Amino acid sequence: MVNHTENEAAAIGSRRCAGRTKRGLAPWAFATVFAAACGVQEHENTTANNAPVYAEPPPSSTGSGSGSDLGSSGSSGNPSNGSSTGSSSSSSSGGALSSDASASVPPAEGGAPHADAGPPLSGITVDINGTMVPKEKVIAFIHLGHSNMAGRAGGPTSSRPYFFTDVDPHAWLYRGGFKPALEPFTAGDELNNGPSYGGEQTPLAGPGTALVKQAATMAPGYYFVSLGYGKESSYCAEYLPGHLYYESMILNAKALVGKVTFGAIVIMLGITERHGTAQDITGYPQCINQLVTDIRNDVNTPNLPLLLTDFEMLSTDVTPNSAFGQAIIPQIHMVPSVVTNSALVPTDNMTPGTGTIVMLPPPNHHFDLEGHRVWTQRALTIMKQKGWFPWGS
């Protein structure tokens, strides 16, 4: 049995009853939690106006946060640029979450790339903090997943400034407008303001900030944008179109179609398939393939790379040797043979020179702050090795 906070367990139960009542539960599902929660009819909102609500990080000094900071729209024939003539608008929302401190935003740095820095420029530009940046130099990562993506990391204390207050002028998030990439705003859910485990500092962080900050370090002069969405205990089928989370997850990416270059899809799922049915486990590779195909189609980038987390091999609550672990791990490892342009991001510490992933204190299956930094660096390194990270030197 996996330990959850009271709020998390209740949220899981009410969501499953509202959105998945026609599906059977796997043997390891939380039957008692579901039974207690099924008397409450709560439905997850998936529209723009009903997306999870929380406070935003400080806006850019010139951006309105209404989507007006986008430059002229248009399309390019190169699918790797994520170009299209279609776009939608969205609005920022405010509310429950708070950051460690308000961060001042330094002026963005930018300008036209050198003549040999990439493909011919389309002429489409994006206004980021008052600087008009060519879309070819604005690289967006779509990242989504379960609670590890939303973020349950509060420490170590020495790492908190990097995630919560230190602003990188080339690392941004987009939620109806461009804001500095800081936690818990990249993909946080309603549980980021309270400690999931005793002794944690709050708010809590996920990997989004580390992903775009480290990408910016690898490619000076480029701008990297987080398009994140995380939800506790969510599993693959819940992210498919027509289900609980797809529309909320894809909303901001659709708003940037034709305006930026899409860099990758980064997914943290797998360990949470235990919250679904036996079919969700055995059909995991096919579900990921469908989800990735739908995202690629919606952002008009058919070859957009997928970086998918492996099973959390250092987990101390849902362990790799458990019955569930033994059932899902072969399905996770099958994904690269099913999904084109995809790779698994390791979660163990078996490969020298790739850093050390650190988990939260047991029993747990979540990364701490340094664990997120190491995991995202591994993802970016894989992209570089496979030729999926053509930006920078």
Image (cartoon, grey):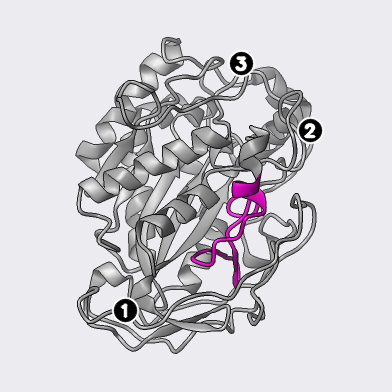
The chief SS type of the magenta part is: loop
Q: Which residue is mark 2?
A: 39
**Amino acid type for the residue under numbered disc 2:** Gly
In the image, residue 27 lies at what x, y percent?
53, 16
The magenta stretch is: 161-188
Q: Which mark is residue 113?
A: 1
User: In the rendered image of this protein, does residue 367 appear above or below residue 361?
Assistant: below
**Mark 1 vs mark 3: in front:** 1
Q: Residues within 10 Å of mark 1 (few under 14, many from 20)?
A: some
- Camera-nearest residue between 94 and 249: 94
The answer to whether residue 245 is visible is no
On whether residue 287 falls in the magenta region, the answer is no
Q: Which mark is first along the chain, 2 or 3? A: 2
**Amino acid type for the residue under numbered disc 1:** Pro
Element at label 1:
loop
**Amino acid type for the residue under numbered disc 3:** Pro
In the image, residue 235 lies at what x, y percent?
50, 37
Q: Which residue is mark 3?
A: 362
- Camera-nearest residue between 212 and 275: 212
